[in-house]
Image: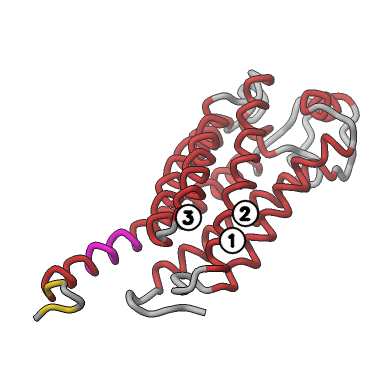
């Protein structure tokens, strides 16, 4: 029997393929988020800075966990970024394929770029400051574009392939990216000057590092929530 001109067997096979791809995308999102968070926690606990200070989310940049010769487990952190970035790139590609619009495909390209740049941050730690900052700020820019585009696609998708409430955590991640990228502009500091502050007169509570941590927290939360919704989705049914 044919459905809409498509043989039933072919339709079933296409649905099975779609389900496998969707669940692979979900697994990549969950795995990537877990790896990067685990890498941060594992390296922050034994961390002792150049002044033997403990690590704090309130006044340390994330990338300081990867400084070779300072962070005790720098290699662990850098490998976790490299691994998680590549896995998240696969997640982004799968998400674009699931949503199936031109704008979703553009978001996926940006997301794959963000994942690759995340990996490059691990390949080029802060020991190589200038290239590290170029790669890191390119990642933040791609991340901003990615969550902005995906939030628009999810909000306007007539088929509701993902629940529209996912726009809320996406916009929270977008705001975090924007706040971090705006900080050097608002404070009239270059990224290099921001790092010099961390080496000379590190504040006890520093908006720059808090914004960066908010980026990590909000974007991984969004990825996890999207992944859960992808895994739970039943093909052929909409979600709200």
Front residue of this view, candidates 69 and 133 = 133
Q: Position of residue 103 (x, y in %)?
A: 50, 54
Position of residue 124 in the picture relative to residue 6 (left or right): right
Q: Position of residue 184 (x, y in %)?
A: 82, 35
Q: Residue at x 33, y 74 (%)?
A: 235
Q: Which of the numbered marks, if any, corresponds to residue 192?
A: none
Per the rendered image, the range of residues in magenta is 16-23
Q: Position of residue 230 (x, y in %)?
A: 42, 67
Say if 238 sits above or below 19 in the image. Answer: below
Q: Residue at x 48, y 73 (%)?
A: 158
Please give the residue where the numbered disc 1 appears in the rendered image: 151
Mark 1 surroundings within 10 Å by alpha-carbon count, few (fewer than 14), some (14 through 19), many (20 or more): many
Residue 44 included in the magenta stretch of the image:
no
Q: Which of the numbered marks, if any, corresponds to residue 148?
A: 2
Label 3, secondary structure: give it.
helix
Please give the residue where the numbered disc 3 appears in the rendered image: 104
Measured in 3D between alpha carbons, the distance from the residue under mark 2 to the one under mark 3, in whole angstroms, is: 11 Å
Position of residue 181 in the picture relative to residue 189 (left or right): left
Determine contact: label 2, label 3, CB under 8 Å. no
């Amino acid at each position: 029997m044919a459905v809409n001109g498509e043989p039933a067997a072919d339709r079933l096979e296409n649905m099975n393929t779609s389900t496998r791809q969707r669940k692979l995308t979900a697994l990549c999102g969950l795995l990537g988020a877990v790896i990067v968070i685990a890498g941060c926690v594992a390296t922050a606990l034994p961390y002792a800075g150049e002044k033997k200070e403990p690590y704090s989310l309130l006044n340390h940049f994330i990338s300081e966990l990867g400084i070779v010769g300072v962070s005790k487990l720098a290699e662990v952190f850098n490998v976790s970024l490299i691994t998680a970035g590549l896995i998240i790139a696969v997640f982004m590609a799968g998400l674009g394929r699931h949503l199936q619009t031109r704008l979703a495909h553009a978001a996926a390209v940006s997301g794959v770029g963000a994942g690759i740049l995340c990996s490059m941050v691990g390949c080029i730690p802060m020991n190589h400051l200038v290239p590290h900052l170029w790669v890191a700020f390119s990642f933040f820019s791609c991340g901003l574009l990615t969550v902005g585009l995906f939030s628009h696609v999810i909000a306007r998708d007539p088929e509701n392939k993902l629940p529209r409430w996912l726009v809320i955590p996406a916009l929270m991640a977008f705001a975090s990216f924007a706040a971090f990228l705006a900080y050097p502009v608002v404070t009239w500091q270059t990224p290099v000057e921001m790092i010099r502050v961390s080496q000379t007169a590190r504040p006890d509570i520093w908006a720059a590092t808090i914004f960066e941590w908010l980026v990590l927290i909000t974007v991984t939360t969004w990825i996890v929530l999207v992944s859960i919704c992808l895994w739970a989705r039943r093909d052929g049914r909409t979600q709200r």
